[in-house]
Amino acid sequence: MAKEITGYLKLQVKGGQANPSPPVGPALGSKGLNIMEFCKQFNGRSQDKMGQVLPVLITIYSDKSFDFVIKTPPAPVMLLEASKQKKGSSEPNRLKVGSVSWAQVKEIAEVKMPDLNAFTIESAMKMVAGTARSMGLRVTGTAPWNN
């Protein structure tokens, strides 16, 4: 028989670096979950993405057990990494802080594809480019679908 789900918990944790200190410990402890068990499992499954911020969706069951799904890194984090910026613009419509090329946008869209609600790589690229613009990053070059 399937276990009864009592709730979900969303966290953003650096890959391979989960530990019981805040924010992970208090969030899991308040739900009555085994904090060290989560840390061991998460660190084991995210060794290949060491240091990257990874969203995690934790499914909590009635017997205090859990499952979790590791998502792809957030698009803004990847865009900042690609543009070599520390943070986005405070006024993205007026002040541009950096730029990314369409090739970089395509790479990010390919990585993000499983988590986006897009069917084609072009639509995923448009979503990532929109995120870049809303962060104050310029997308340089011509879009591949305009050629």
Image: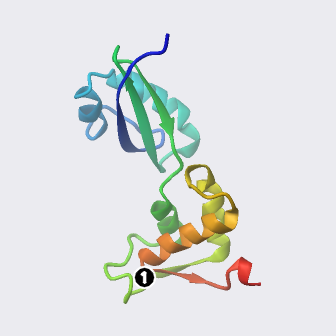
Three-letter amino acid code at disc 1?
Val
**Percent position of residue 73, x then y:** 50, 52
**Percent position of residue 99, x then y:** 53, 80
Q: Image check: 55 left or right of 45? A: left
Residue at position x 41%, y 29% from top? 59
* Image height of 26 relative to 80, above or below: above
Q: Nearer the viewer, residue 136 or 17?
A: 136
Which quarter of the rendered picture does the C terminus lie within? Answer: bottom right
Residue at position x 38%, y 70% from top? 87
Residue at position x 23%, y 33% from top? 26
* Image height of 18 relative to 83, above or below: above
Quadrant of res 20: top left
Q: Image check: 109 left or right of 43? A: right
Q: Image check: 89 left or right of 27? A: right
Q: Image check: 62 left or right of 47? A: left
Q: Please, what secondary structure does the residue beneath circle 1 have?
A: loop
Residue at position x 68%, y 68% from top? 122
**Percent position of residue 40, x then y:** 44, 26
The crowding category of the residue bearing disc 1, from other C-alpha atoms within 10 Å (few below 14, some 14 to 19, many at least 20), is: some
Q: Nearer the viewer, residue 9 or 103?
A: 9
Identify residue for label 1: 97
Q: How many marks?
A: 1
Outermost residue to the right? 147
